[in-house]
Image (tube, coloured by chain):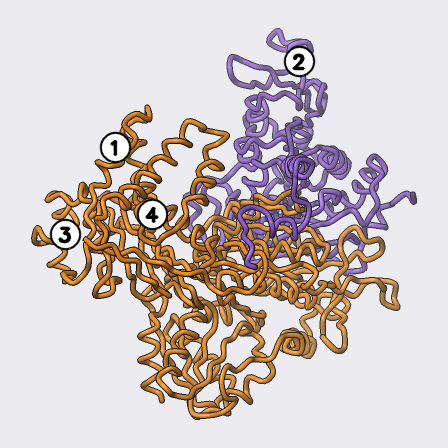
Amino acid sequence: MQHKVIDAKNVVIRFAGDSGDGMQLTGTLFANTSAVYGNELSTFPDYPAEIRAPQGTVSGVSGFQVHIASGEVNTPGDYCDMLVAMNPAALKANAKWCKRTAIILIDKDAFTDALIEKAGFKTKNPFTELGLDECKLIIAPITTLTEESLKDSGMDKKSIDRCKNMFTLGIAYFLFDRPLDYTFEYIEKKFGKKRPEMVEPNKKVLQDGYNYAANLQMIADTYYIAPAKLKKGTYRNITGNQATAWGLMAASEKSGLPLFCGSYPITPATEILQELAIHKYLGVKTLQAEDEIAAICMAIGAAFAGNLAVTTTSGPGLSLKSEALGLAVMTELPLVVVDVQRAGPSTGIPTKTEQTDLNQALYGRNGECPIPVLASHSPSNCFDAAFNAAKIALEHMTPVILLSEGFLGNGSEPWLIPHMADYPEIKPPFATKLSEDGTFHPFERDPETLVRKWAIPGQKNFEHRVGGLEKNHTGMLSSDPANHQMMVDERRAKVQKIADFIPELQVDGPEKGKLLVVGWGGTYGHILSAVSGVREAGKTLSRAHFDYIVPVPRNTKEILESFETVLVCELNSGQFAGYLRTLFPKANIVSFGKVQGQPFLVNELVDAINKEI
Amino acid sequence: MAILSFKDFKSNQEVRWCPGCGDHAVLASLQRALPQVSKACNYVRERYVVVSGIGCSSRLPYYMNTYGFHSIHGRATAIATGIKVANPWLTVWQACGDGDALAIGGNHFIHAIRRNIDINIILFNNQIYGLTKGQYSPTSKFGAVTKTSPYGTVEHPFNPGSLVLGAKGTFFARSLDVELALNQEIMTTGALHDGTSVIEMLTNCVIFNDGVYKNISDSSVRADRTIILRHGEKMIFGKNKDKGLVLDGLDLKVVTIGQDGYTIDDILVHDAHTENAGIHMMLAEMKYPDFPVALGVIRDVKDVTYDDGVRDQVKDVTAKAKIHCMDELLNSGSTWEVK
């Protein structure tokens, strides 16, 4: 076979296997190697809720998609150029994501008649059955080769079998011309101290996989993806959940307040708590509570005591926290609630992504209970979004809901490391003066911002009581009808006035015209790609993305009413579209939604946009 | 430092409990205990935070001239925990009822005790939901007739003492609303205890459960039907101080000194500091008419506290840390240059 090096600008690779096959790690290592190599990239882990679902079944398949390019990358890619399928079930579950002529690498040893049948195939030829005849197949006996590679390692068979993913990664590195150094370093770091005997076997099996692909020339083509022309600076890879944790810590540093996180483990938000728990040396306190309600209440207690208080959760947890959120609104204490959204309702599909908690964030509480709502739009943007959420909470004395998504939390991308000097100070409105009667009036407000002052226990002569009962400005209980109306109005106006402190909505494209495509949250990259695609076809349209949902930026009305049609694309049945219609009844708002537990495909967005042009 | 008096702890808010409610006595006891605590520990008033949930007793923070937080039903323990972990310098008190702490807030209650976080919980136990006007609670006696159990309850009550001890509690004390001096004594001891202190106050709800403790609290019978336990003292009770507790096999037994061959030397000495919770459990579960109801500090043992654990861990990892600020963290680990 003639070996050819293809110069590709853009490649999407999907690693798939049993949930115990280590595909998440394989994909992550491939992504990190590509990042260090200098490619732009985006990743998308797609895994089942079960930690170890029945082996060899479609329900137990875990996937990790990575999109690498020498140019701009906005999404993890719709369809893949290469699929690694460690068994027939992985092939079956992922065939629908393959391009027509994709390369498919399989472990021949796992494609036995028994496993083909277990995966639910009706014939003994899964490729034809799935309509993959035009794909290029690379059939390698990965299990056998891994065993052969490590036969002298002294490892038992089970441990050797676990190294299949490293052998596979070696093949992928050859195919896409990636250096092995990063992975070698990873292996040394991971095993070096605790299990030094594992270092050499892991390196060997990776190198053997690479050599196998190189020597046998079994692969017709390899790919060269040139490094991207990135902005100068120092980069790192970051996942959305890690960036969220770090953004909160950055706000803690900028405000000078210790960070307290009360949280309860829940997919896909748990990594934020885990990440924060590592950084106690930067003044972070984490408390794994007995339940979701305790988690937010502990955070509210910490806020009362003067910390930057945070609670992290996903949709079902947010439901449980509703009553306490109302308490935070009523006591006007700063609090950041991060909701990493997942497919609902109820337990839903915990590991799949959605934007279906928007209405819950907007309205899910008793009484008139306004809360600022922000959204993160990419894995690395989670850092800024978390920082901004904390800044608003602390400076405006209010709970803030930050909506993230499973897609963002687990996804990763290279990130130009920011400098803390470029971030603004955070200045909470600490109480310094007593009222004329010599006591502290907790609900007296700044006339401009309507923000109350924050007196923290320990401050002499500022003793006061807060609570869930309605009060007047002095802090005395009040069920006076006029006072209640005034306090309700003030709490709402206080949140609306935050619009004066956030950036205006940016329009990508003409400021008025036929079509404005609107999104919020993690659909950012897909909408950006789709709009670019439609523009390449010679059409004119504009795009705007909302990072701030409550309140909306000041210029929102003017922008939305400047277009004949506003197409709102979101991963729900039109929640943001409905919200915008309520706020701006004159705008012509059309909704395009999808609720499948999966991100948008760029293609389906292009189709939806073309229908409106 | 100025010496604080009970007046310093009285707020300007009008106390709105029903006349004759047992909660008045608990409030007065706390307002008198805190000056003693302040004197003993050199505490200033701004150091105190009083937290509550929802219910009649949860109004208490409004009547205390300290920092206060009247929160939501059942969650006071979680809020108190957050306050204490955020700032361990604060001294945190919690007021809660039997429905508040043991029904809707049961989970937080047992977990605070398990963690042994240094907060002081006053559990007002009147065996009824008062603020909602008379429904049975988790401490109502089996068969209690209330608005939601017109034919009597068919469920067993919690004994708060056994719940605390079962959750590995380090401090449990009990008193009757009318025992003002004892209340102050156990509140002070509870405040000095490092860890979760649970103080059960048997309170009378004059409207919906009037007389629920009458058979032990009435002044004519109280001495014979309750026993005040003090560490290192003999377990003696009765109007004539002639009754006492002995161990009979594996059980406690009430004896009369000078009868059946029992002398003062046979009477048990209370050891609140013993690790062994078995004897504390037996004392906490004593019920009239077979036994006197135990009052006073039943258990007071030392163990590591959650807040100290958090503080020490932060100190420890900070001392070892190579990263000291966000810029260093952002640039740590795997990074690469684009030139």
> What chain is colored orange?
A
Q: Residue at x 36, y 31 (%)?
A: A201
Rendered shade, chain B: purple
Q: CA distance from mark 3 to mark 4?
A: 21 Å
> Which residue has dot 3 on it?
A120
Q: Position of residue B37 (x, y in %)?
A: 80, 38
Tell us which disc is closer to us: 4 or 1: 1
Q: SS class of the residue under badge 1?
A: helix
Parent chain of label 4? A
Secondary element type, mark 2: loop
Q: Which residue is mark 4?
A: A23
Give amino acid for label 3.
Answer: Gly
Contact flag, marks 2 and 1 (Cβ < 8 Å):
no
Q: Quadrant of the C terminus of chain A?
A: bottom left
Q: Earlier in the sequence, mark 3 or mark 4?
A: 4
Q: Nearer the viewer, residue B138 or B324?
A: B324
Q: Which mark is residue A147?
A: 1
x, y percent for residue B29: 76, 43
